[in-house]
Amino acid sequence: MISPKAIRTWAWVHKWSSLVCTVFMLLLCLTGLPLIFHHEINHLLGTDVEAPAVPAGTPMADLDRVMETAKARNPTLGGMFVSREPDDDRVWYVTMSPTPTSDSGLKQVAVDARTAAPLAEPSLDSGFMYIMYSLHIDLFAGLPGTLFLGLMGILLVVATVSGVVLYAPFMRKLGFGDVRRERSTRIKWLDLHNLLGIVTLVWVFVVGATGVINTWADLVVKYWQNDQMAEMIAPYKGLPPPATHGSLQKAVTEALALEPDMKLGFIAFPGTSFSSPHHYTVFMRGNTPFTSKLFKPVLVDSQTGKVTDSREPPWYLTGLLLSQPLHFGDYGGLPMQILWAVLDILTIIVLGSGLYLWLKRRNPVVQRDLTEPERLAETPAGANP
Amino acid sequence: MKSGMWTWPIILGVLTTIGLLSALLGDGVWDALSWVTLGVPVAVCVWYGWMRRTKAAA
């Protein structure tokens, strides 16, 4: 049995961890809602890329031609990444930038993977989804914004755990799911807050914790570069970075030959944060639902077109990669997206009711309605109830 | 403490965990298992939160 003093301490932890993060969590829940359906929304807005029909059996275009197409659109920019949707190999998305490590001035060209014809130039920095995405990822403030949101996410996890501890004293005289509607509005919302909070607990905890892990993505990749990538490119240490690079198609062909049972995920160009100055890094994904979430990097020398090294991702990269689907809810089709959205809305109700309960905390009429443990939890730590 | 206070929270937590993992591990029937097991907590929220109208014990 939890002591009155412990209840007050946990109530204090729950109150302050929640109060600090609630506004940001509401923002994340609201902006996250359209992000769950980003494919569908882009389709409705007409901003997604449609690949035209081509005769069956049309071979894939050479990737060097694909790059020429992208380059013709952005003659002053260089290649950064080439990627495609996991379920659609008809379109390449070529991301280009002033330098391999630029984080502004990026352009993207969607190129038909069969004909190497330009299809579209999706905007990377405007539109409704860009605003939702930026508010959700970094509050338009880059890495500091991302890390700040991660800190708020840690507070959410603390609020979730302390909320579970407080569930017991609040439910002492209630059955599961009881909502006292005949009492005051505040009591009704207290019961709803406890009900929705405990039922959505595991989902909120997992989405919150994986969201926090995702905020460390840049740092994790940086660490991987200094750790495993540095070992793989050790033979190139001290060599000047080459001024020009060889065939991209050759690099991809070599990577596919090395891992014939894997599929191409994306390609990082030499000098980017996912590669070395001397290599194209071809990130291969597995063929099963589980391994398709994981990427195995294949480093291909950009001059010789020969594979330098390829290693299984270390545990911390695997953890980061697995925390992405668990946060996005994009791995179980439309029904899962809908469930994700409903759980997101339920979380908004838990956050909003928590805020409401705090705002209404000092109402004497309400105080009279409280049971003893509730009064303890409502009283600031150290004060005599 | 009311007996069995944690029974339903634990069952729902286990269902949610199964739902989060199964679609990650497979397609088809594994996705369907996810929809069902994640659907239960959602249904519980909606039922007890807004649909049940019996008088709760105070």
Image: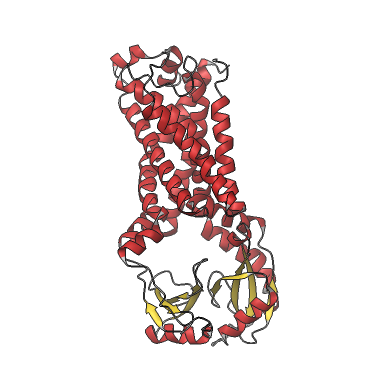
Quadrant occupied by the C terminus of chain A: top left
**Residue pictured at 36% horizontal, 63% vertical:** A42
The correct choice, above or below, for A252 with respect to A370 in the image is below
The residue closer to the viewer here, A156 or B9, is B9
Q: Quadrant of residue A70?
A: bottom left
Q: Quadrant of residue A131?
A: bottom left
The residue closer to the viewer here, A311 or B3, is B3
The correct choice, above or below, for B11 with respect to A6 in the image is below
Residue B42 spot, x, y in % from top left: 45, 37
Q: Is residue B36 visible?
A: yes
Residue A77 spot, x, y in % from top left: 42, 81
Residue A298 spot, x, y in % from top left: 64, 73
Image side of residue A222 versus residue B43, left or right: right
**Residue pictured at 53% horizontal, 21% vertical:** A6
Q: Residue furthest front?
A: A56
Q: Quadrant of residue B10?
A: top right
Residue A186 spot, x, y in % from top left: 32, 22
Quadrant occupied by the N terminus of chain A: top right
The residue closer to the viewer here, A119 or A160, is A119
Q: How is colour applied across the structure in the image?
A: secondary structure
**Residue pictured at 57% horizontal, 25% vertical:** B7
The correct choice, above or below, for A213 with respect to A61 in the image is above
The residue closer to the viewer here, A213 or B22, is B22
Image side of residue A339 versus residue A279, left or right: left
**Residue pictured at 43% horizontal, 85% vertical:** A69
Q: Is residue A15 visible?
A: no
